[in-house]
Image (spheres, rainbow, N blue to C red):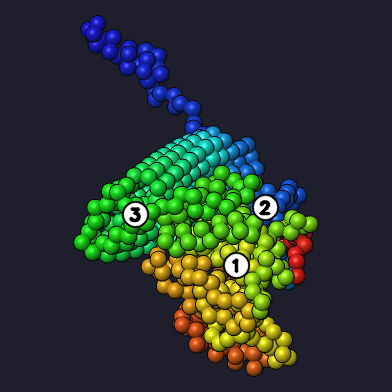
Amino acid sequence: MSAETEAGSTAATAASGTSPGATGAASPGPTPAPAPAAIPIDGLVAPAGAAISSWNTPDGKPVSSQVLFRAGDVAITREQTIGTDAYGNNYVTLDQVVLATGSGNDDVQISQRVNGMLDVNVNGQKYEINLGQYHTPPPPGQPAQELAVRTGDGNDIVNAPTVSVNLAVKAGAGDDSITTGRGFDGVDGGAGDDQIATGAGRDDVFGGAGNDRIDGGADDDVLYGGDGRDTIEGGDGNDYLEGGRGDDTLEGRRGNDILSGGMDNDTLRAGADDDRVYTGAGRDTVDYLSGCDTVYGQAVVDNISAATATQNNVVETQTRAGWSVKIADNATPEFRQRVEADLDLLRSSPQGQQLLEALDKAATEKGNSVTLSELRNEQNGYAGFRDPVSGQVVGFDLAVNYATPGGPGPGTDAEVVYNPAFHNAEFPTPVGVLQHELAHAYNAVTGTLQPDIYRGAGLDAPQWDSAGKLTFSVDNLERQAVGLPTTATSGSANPTFATENALRQEFGQADRLSYNFNVPALSPSPGSTASLQSNPHAFLDRMLDASRSGDREAFSRLTEQAGAAEPGAALRREASETVDRQERAANVAQPVPEPAQAVEPHSVVARGPSR
């Protein structure tokens, strides 16, 4: 063997781990450690002796949290929020399995099996999370469980593109990458430069402070950039895009979109279909390629390049309008950013400007002002006044807030409590919900609320049982805020600008034709009482109760109402689903109940705030 060949042979044997002249196979290296086994998590069953904690939301709702699993920085809990209706009844407003990863750079990967099981991988550790509704249907009116992911500070990844259950993702400070799937998802990117993409489904996204990039994907989405230089794309569907503070770029793409630039110098591209664009303050650029669009912009200041069919409306943004409307001192930064963005749109809106200026006038002439507070863990909004004794927002005072045959009452301060992330098919935009509650506030500060219940016909007509007891009614003041006729003998209809329908018309949306949608209590309504708001199946449950009790008169009346409702086919499907759900629930052994019911709600007044 040559010296060169021998050297090569020696090098080869050294690399193989054998000594020169040794025979046989090389010794194997160390066996890699097996991947950690997946940890099963049941959203309804906590381990024996699991820790329980409780607290109240800023608006006074008790929250009960029980630990399902904890190891290192990772904690998985079940959180239930308990509301109380005007009659003192408790109900669950939100039921979540919460995955918290703590601070640091986390990688969370989520997929979903055909049977609903969620496979979750957090930094290499796998979890099998079974949300409650996939083996035990929730009681009628109680929301299905959803998965909440809270990553904390750090540059985090949350990737769930194939998941169809509803996700609630809240990231902390850091540059995060968040992708969700086909559910009705809520995403809060937190501070930092975030990349957020949502798939199909009605989604709500808040980028937070920082330069964010947001893609809404398919369906009707609500996308808020927050503070910073943001880029927002609506994708398909009728989307609502709000840039917030900073120089933003908004692109609506397909669908009838609403684009609001907010403050500073923005670029707004509406895309196809019929859009509404509000440039807001600053030097903005509006570019239209197609569609029959409406632009509310500023003369001279804005640069508008429009398609042939576009209608340009010159609206001088009134940056001082609404100076009397205050945001509560205890508001979170996220709530403050979203509310300021909503107010900025109203300052650019012909109807919104008039409403804000009317509130300012009441503050100047009567000394009555409006405060905006946050509604947590509930999809709703309401208006009332804060009782100085209890500290709670309660119903209006008949002696001062309501109109009389002799004229308006003196009025009082008013407080609007709403969730700026609340929107659904009936209420496509959070600012539309705010408009409804500000209409109530307008009546409260001017002393012009209309008294008594509505006694007319239609879906808002009062109902009595066979014993003559009133079982359902709508206050005149609710129809007054919507912009519908009332049967009140005191007071008058609101000016158009102080109605919900005024903003709907400006947005190109259909009028709200009754306070209740479809049939009583079937769909959530901003301003409805808590019991109606929390129980979308209440009407169908009343039909079932009437059938079981043998009350043929009540069952016949309810059936006729359901059949007469516009979406009758949908009601029949939902009735069938409700019966099936209750039968399945009766045949499934219930797990050990969680102690969330032990949380005592705050006391409630006999009549709650106007909702």
| Structural distance between the alpha carbons of marks 2 and 1 | 28 Å
Q: Which residue is drawn at 54% across and 51% down?
A: 323
The answer to which image quadrant residue 132 occupies is bottom right
Label 3 packing within 10 angstroms: few (<14), some (14-19), many (20+): many
Left or right: residue 357 versus residue 19 is right
| Badge 3 amino acid | Gly
Task: Residue under label 2, please give it.
Answer: 57
Q: Spatial distance from mark 3 to mark 1, Cα to Cα?
A: 30 Å
Q: Are marks 3 and 2 in contact (CB under 8 Å)?
A: no
Q: Which of 81 and 390 is in front in this view?
A: 390
Query: What residue did someone put label 3 on?
Result: 297
| Left or right side of 259 for 442 | right
Vertical comparison of 587 with 377: above or below: below
Residue 295: percent from left, percent from top: 32, 58
Numbered disc in front, either 2 or 1:
1
Quarter of the image where the C terminus is located = bottom right
Q: Is residue 145 visible?
A: no
Q: Are marks 3 and 1 in contact (CB under 8 Å)?
A: no
Residue bearing the label numbered 1: 443
Q: Residue at x 29, y 51 (%)?
A: 286
| Amino acid under disc 2 | Thr
Looking at the picture, how far across and down is residue 2, in whole percent? 22, 7
Q: Which of marks 3 and 2 is nearer the N terminus?
A: 2
